[in-house]
Amino acid sequence: MNKRNLLLTIGLGIFFILAIALWHEPQAQAPMDGVPPGGAPNMMGGFREQMAITQALPLDSSWTFLSFEVELSDEALVKARKLYQDAWNQRKEKITDKMDELRGDPDAMAGLKAESEKIWSNLKTKLNEILTPDQSEKLATWEKENKNQLRRIPFSGGEAGNRRQRQ
């Protein structure tokens, strides 16, 4: 009798484990209406748009480059900081605060990218007034290398990012 109870207990235990495992098994579900398989509408498109805006206005990385790679005098660094602060405030006011509400609207996001490019262009113009020609050249070289590097990242709008769309 003892052996019989042991076998019954083991059998019931295995049954309950299998029942719990089958209960929690993931089930395939059809996508909701209007949602492509794999995610929400414009999910990767929104990411690409945000990356394009970030690429058009690389304040963080360019400030880091100027601060640590380009030998600026203390006076030039203070002047550059003021220019970056102004650009940072413009980005927050004209782009960052509006990005969430406009996400998903390609025309509006294109407008934000254009605004980013305008802020970056104005910043570079003002920076060239305080940088030496050699320092300006270093910044221009950095910018070109930075854009080429970002194009190689999948989904950043470069060749690798467009590959998935063509399939």
Image: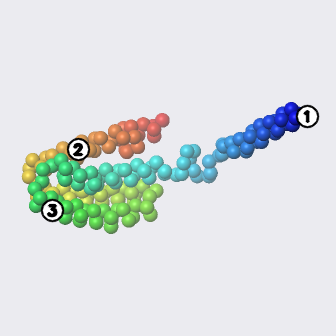
Secondary structure of residue under mark 3: helix
Work out whether residue 120 or residue 33 is closer to the camera in this orientation and state it: 120
Q: Label 3 sits on what residue type?
A: Val
Q: Label 2 sits on what residue type?
A: Lys
| Residue 15 visible in image | no
| Labels 2, 3: front one | 3
Q: Which residue is mark 1?
A: 1
Residue at image x 30%, y 60%? 115
Instruction: Tell me where residue 144 sits by quadrant.
Output: top left
- Dot 2 or dot 3: first in sequence order is 3
Q: Which residue is mark 2?
A: 144
In the drawing, does residue 106 fall left or right of residue 59? right
Q: Separation of disc 2 and disc 3 at Cα?
A: 25 Å
Q: Is residue 100 above or below residue 136?
A: below
Secondary structure of residue under mark 2: helix
Instruction: Give residue 7's position: percent from left, percent from top.
Output: 84, 33
Question: Colour mode?
Answer: rainbow
Q: Which residue is mark 3?
A: 78
Secondary structure of residue under mark 1: loop
